[in-house]
Image: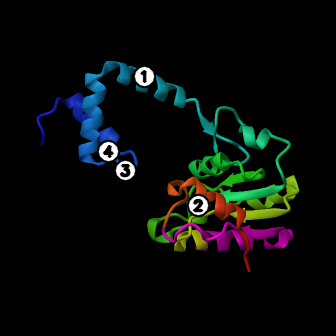
Amino acid sequence: MRPFPEKLRKLIEELKKLPSIGERTAELVAFDLVVNREKLVGLIGALEEAGSLGLCRVCHTITEGEVCGVCSDESREPILMIVESPMDMYRIEETGVFRGKYHVIGGLIAPLEGVEPSHLFIDDIPDRIRREGIREVVFALSPTVEGDATMFYIMDLIRDTGVRITRIARGIPTGFTISKTDEITLEEALKSRQPVE
């Protein structure tokens, strides 16, 4: 065990719980925050403010109020894009190509990892399609085995709604996540979405 003060060790352990942060990175960040107090104060303030964020009660993305800005925008087209995470939604929004609505399911069905449909925001999709007069559902899930399994599960749930079902084109390499895709590839994939048979 490294001879760090207990509070520093605690900070390192908490940082390691964040995505993509290993032992060395956590140590570098922790030391930087403690040595540069203004960064630490800024981070503490941002974390306190982030505590007031929640999930949109309609689409399940991150929002400051009960309903996010996209769901509140009445000019949006009656097309519903199914995405895994709020980050995927915001990456797609950055392209400026899609003017429909979103539904963030919060992950992918992965039984081997203990993620079942009941753990995701899936059950409310059929009601939302009917309630909002959705004409097309676009799947923008990562092109993985889990992504395809999740898509087919949702397709079975919504088949009787009569909605058109498409998915974004496979311009995104298989096994790659949407949040790590560059903007040009993502834009082309959105423009080239195909019917799902």
Q: Identify the residue position indicated by label 2 in the image.
A: 185
* Real-space CA distance between mark 4 and mark 3, rounded to the nearest whole angstrom: 8 Å
Relative vertical location of residue 104 with respect to residue 56 in this rendering, above or below: below
**Residue 33's x, y, as percent?**
31, 27
From which residue to which does the magenta span run? 149-175
**What crowding class fits label 3: few (fewer than 14 Cα within 10 Å), some (14-19), or many (20 or more)?**
few
Q: Identify the residue position indicated by label 4 in the image.
A: 16
Q: Which-is-in-front pick, marks 2 and 4?
A: 2
Kindly state the secondary structure of the residue where label 3 is placed: loop
Residues at circles 3 and 2 in contact by the CB criterion of under 8 Å: no
**What crowding class fits label 1: few (fewer than 14 Cα within 10 Å), some (14-19), or many (20 or more)?**
few
Relative vertical location of residue 106 with respect to residue 196 in this rendering, above or below: above
Residue 138 sits inside the magenta stretch:
no
Residues at circles 4 and 1 in contact by the CB criterion of under 8 Å: no
Kindly state the secondary structure of the residue where label 1 is placed: helix
- Amino acid found under the numbered disc labelled 3: Ser
* Real-space CA distance between mark 2 and mark 4, rounded to the nearest whole angstrom: 31 Å
**What crowding class fits label 2: few (fewer than 14 Cα within 10 Å), some (14-19), or many (20 or more)?**
some
N-term-proximal mark, 3 vs 2: 3
Q: Which-is-in-front pick, marks 2 and 1?
A: 2
**What crowding class fits label 4: few (fewer than 14 Cα within 10 Å), some (14-19), or many (20 or more)?**
some
- Amino acid found under the numbered disc labelled 1: Gly
**Residue 100's x, y, as percent?**
78, 52
Q: Identify the residue position indicated by label 3 in the image.
A: 20
Kindly state the secondary structure of the residue where label 2 is placed: helix
N-term-proximal mark, 2 vs 1: 1
* Real-space CA distance between mark 3 and mark 2, rounded to the nearest whole angstrom: 23 Å
Horizontal relation, residue 163 to residue 68: left or right: right
Q: Which mark is residue 42?
A: 1
Horizontal relation, residue 160 to residue 175: left or right: right
Kindly state the secondary structure of the residue where label 4 is placed: helix
- Amino acid found under the numbered disc labelled 2: Thr
